Amino acid sequence: MRAWPQFASLSMGLIPVTVLVAMVASIVINSKDAFTEIGVRELSDTKFSSLFLSGTAHYGLAPALMGSIELLVVAISLALPISLAMAIFAAEFAPSVVGRVMRMLLGLMSGIPPIIYALMAIVFVAPFMVPKFTGDLSYANVHPEKIGFSAADWPPPDVPWNAGAFPWDPSGGDNSVLLAGILLSMLVIPFMAPLIEDALRNVPSEPKQASLALGAGRWYTLVRITLPYALSGIISAVRLGMLKVLGDLMIALFVVGYAAPRFPDPPWDVLERTAPLTATGAGLIGGLGTPKLCQATDCSVGYVPALMLLVMAVAIVVLTSVLERRFRARYAP
Amino acid sequence: MSASSQVPAAAREQNRLSAREARRPRDLGTPALDRASAVLPVMAFGVSAVALVIACVSLSLNSLDPYRLVVGGALTASLALLVLHVRYEDEAWDLWAIGLLVASAVAVVLLARLPEYTYGHSINGLIHRSLFTAIIQLAIALPTTCVALYYVLGATPTARDLSRYPFLVLPIVLSLFAYVVILFRLVQKGAPDLTWNAISNEYSSRLVGSAFVNEAGMRNHILGTFLLMAMTALIALPIGVGTGIFVTEHDGWLAKLVGFSTSMLRAISVFILAVSAFSLVRYTGDHQGNGVLSDLIRGFYLDDAGFKHPAKGSFLTAAVFLSLLVIPVIARATEEGLRSLPSDIREGSQALGATDGHALLRILLPWSLPNIMTGLLLGSAEAAGSVTVLLFISGRGQYGLGPQHEATSLAYLIFDAGRGAKSFTDVMGQYQFSAALLLLCITFSLTILALFLKQRFATRYRAGISYE
């Protein structure tokens, strides 16, 4: 009985492997119908409507993919500078007490569940932000003639931001990718900043002290010595943030909505209501909480976004791992 | 003849030179600014700092339309900086200052021509010009403030480091402000509804459409959250710890595979867990009928006549899929704990003849216990807050608690009371914010407990040795 710890830990360790294989298999098997009955050609189309939402079925998933990519770009380009500033401040510039307090605060904030951001997004942040930017509030395009303006005098010259004065109600449920990206960046900052801080703290002190002894300032040392050395750690933090943004459902669902009806035009238009893959999949499978609504085709198409997310997650992990290894070899031998 | 003309010309030249030297703190190494040359940097700093503050304010206010003032301020500050550079840096035309000046001139022209709302070629959304103003202003006033601060502090190498603080502090303050505002609003909206009735009563579908809507409460949702957390912890703890031990203590392809799949379990979207849970429940419903397996996976409830009906998904299923979320966290924490074990302790136990099992129970586990507890508590907090996993399989919490009943939790209540069916929203919509506040209390207290226990356990099981 000398080896019972090996058996116990092996049998426990095999559970995640089995479960992962089973989940991938179930997604592949369930999405098989979509590929055989509907075909890759329609699935890669740029027009989307489902039986569940609008009665006619046309399952083009390219808009949802674009929505996911837009969301990734917006959220990470906001979260990375802020968490970088937090990490640099806590690790290099702040007194150790301030650094410790910041770290505790970040640990506390990383416990805020996404659903709370989503809730606050629709009841507080959207009415607050909508006077700043107003995303697409309807399924169709907003045209000025549809809301009582001639195209010539649009936008109206001076609309005061009083309640009800704006042509449409700004507190509507559906909003733009930009707002969802801002909230998602708030979600991932508490996860990214401590990781970057760890990476900065793990830089050995010899090169830093050599640089300082040669007369370089702290900022110069940071930019030329510490940041390149910590680059691989920063990339692993970005990977975590990207995976969290990609996999998030609640904020996208509450802010952007269930489906991306058409491809954004132009493709980088973050003010449009382009729901990401997660929200589209949830809408198809029955995100309203009533599985009875899940029609046979809708349901099998709902597994295709899950498959795409799986592929994207693997791609992100592989790519960032390669980058991480390369940067570590170059800057931190 | 005045007194000054009696001074020899050479001495006067000497005086002029030393006065010029004195104005150049770089050469002297100490900040010895006379009053006249201190005015300009302080003015530039003041103007650009005010511009920065206005930019931050215009990020949050809409009625204020400060762009003329703000851009004028940026232009003034950049001009002042340009003059400063020319005076201090041996009449050199510094690229930074010229760049700032050109940028603010361009910004003035751009913002003066900007309409109140901007939109793309098809109107999918409008952007108010205060947002553009604030962003452009941040981009100009932040470097201007830094450069001006550099001169205010005496243009020394130390001042160069200190002048970078606005770059770091401003994003931190702005983002922390956003968190504080959101949490404050949540407390403000949720606290008044958090009465004893709201906590102790339970939701029942009989209340739909009746006059006794205020008799509904969140008891089942609160207890369901705790039940889910407890079951998740029970399932995830052995698996997570075992996985962590296996990955650290063994090498070879199998350990690598286990480590990789554990990290992939974390990396794949939570949405994939939700979809898998849903397909399991659907498969059981299609193929298992009303057997024991169906009762366990789908859950069931008894109606008034005592007949058994299948539910959407049981607490057991929910806990199993939530534990998949927690297992990687615990495994990673266990790995970290084991890797920090000093080799002399392990070798000492081997030298004294400890078996593998004895070493595991007496050395490895106690040593990594602080990490495991932290991972478990943080994972439970995440499980309590995760609604995505439960999205397709949980119900409204009217059928009671127990592993075989329909799953529900506070997080799902928040979702369902906002986006769910109207009959539920009418009754429970009033408690959306109270539920969010309660959920936040639970996750925050778990996080604080994790931080506290980590220190306590470290002193107890590691003799106070800290390996942070």
Image (cartoon, rainbow, N blue to C red):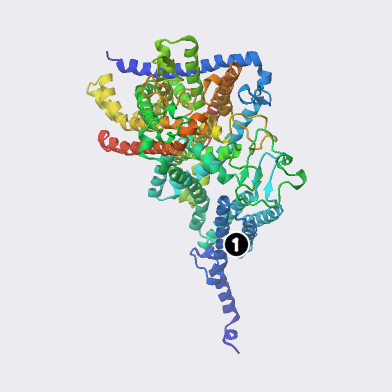
From the viewer's perspective, is B2 left or right of B213? Answer: right
Q: Position of residue B381 (x, y in %)?
A: 39, 33
Label 1 is found on which chain of the structure?
Answer: B
Check the image and name the residue furthest to the bottom.
B1
Residue drawn at the location 58% of the way across and 58% of the way down: B51
From the viewer's perspective, is A268 left or right of B15? Answer: right
Instruction: Tell which of B345 and A126 is nearer to you.
Output: A126
Q: Position of residue A140 (x, y in %)?
A: 68, 33
Q: Position of residue B257 (x, y in %)?
A: 45, 19
Q: Position of residue A118 (x, y in %)?
A: 51, 36
Residue drawn at the location 37% of the way across and 49% of the way down: A97
Above or below, B101 relative to B231:
below
Q: Residues within 10 Å of mark 1 (few under 14, many from 20)?
A: few
Residue drawn at the location 58% of the way across and 82% of the way down: B8
Residue for badge 1: B89
Amino acid type assigned to the residue bearing label 1 in the image: Glu
Can residue A21 be seen in the rendering of this structure?
no
In which quadrant of the rendered view does residue B468 lie?
top left
The kind of secondary structure element at disc 1 is loop
From the viewer's perspective, is A44 left or right of A221? Answer: right
Can residue B153 be seen in the rendering of this structure?
yes
